[in-house]
Amino acid sequence: MKINTRLFGEVEISDDKIIIFENGIIGFPDMKKFALIHDEDAGKGAGIRYMQSLDEANFAMPVMDPLIVKPDYDPEVDDELLAGLGHVTEDNLLVLVTVSVPGDLTRMSVNLRGPLVINVETHKACQMIIDSSDLPVKFPIYEILQSGKAGV
Amino acid sequence: MLALSRKKKEAIVINNNIEITILEVKGDQVKIGIDAPKEVSIYRKEVYLQIQEANSEAVSAEGMDALKDLMG
């Protein structure tokens, strides 16, 4: 299917790339269909991709692999909460965190408390809230990215 | 909003499949127990609001062009 996006214009998304968030994104329950889009130019080095809504062209969230900025990230998740995604194993589970990129880049952060969890086999996904106050909603990443820039 | 008074160990039932019990009352803190089907999401409201705000901020991505310059 062809979809319109604010960031990339018209993009062709094959059906097998569609990711379904049955309960939507937290605070945006109507945002259910998404696709992960790579931008060759954007955030090279930071490994940023976009979770682009197929329902709403203006809705795209920059996302990244949390292990790039927090190598020991391993949130405890109740298996029951993942039951809706189909049979989840270590191999078919993709965990991404949303990235806030404000005008002042030194305030860039990732949300470690509300990761996006995707079963790459069933293409079902959800946003979880991790019940641990140790994981910040705004984990600063500017300095981490700067210091690791050459190595990533 | 419906307001109901409950004592310790009393409960309310919502929609035949959700039961909320008052477990403990200590000063201004109340511990509640929730029995609900697993597909029902339950969050502490202040955390829910923080995540919602973080999602909105992520979508606005004001600094993306500046980041491209920085990383490119």
Image: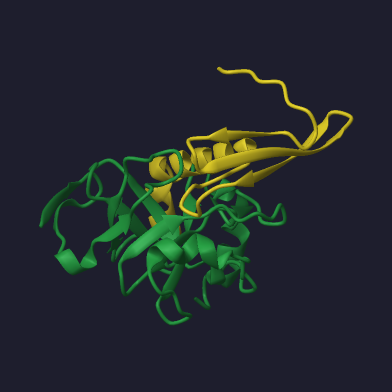
Chain colours: A green, B yellow
- Residue occupying the point 52% across, 48% down: A105
Residue at 66% over, 56% down = A135
- In the rendered structure, the answer to whether residue A41 lies left or right of residue A67 reads left
Q: The N terminus of chain A is located in which quarter?
A: bottom left
Q: Name the image quarter holding residue A84.
A: bottom left
Position of residue A4 relative to residue A63, above or below, is above
Question: Number of numbered discs present?
Answer: 0
Question: Where does the image place residue B57, in percent across and percent down from the top left?
Answer: 47, 40
Relative image position of residue A74 (x, y in whole percent): 61, 70
Residue farthest toward the bottom in the current orientation of the protein: A91
Residue A103 visible in the displayed image: no
Image point (14%, 51%), residue name: A3
- Left or right: residue B56 versus residue A52 is right
Q: Nearer the viewer, residue A21 or A47?
A: A21
User: In x, y percent, where is residue B48?
Assistant: 56, 40
Query: In the rendered view, does A88 fall on the left or right side of A113?
Result: left
Choose between B72 and A54: the one closer to the eye: A54
Q: Is there any visible trace of residue A41 in the rendered image?
A: yes
Q: Quadrant of residue B28?
A: top right
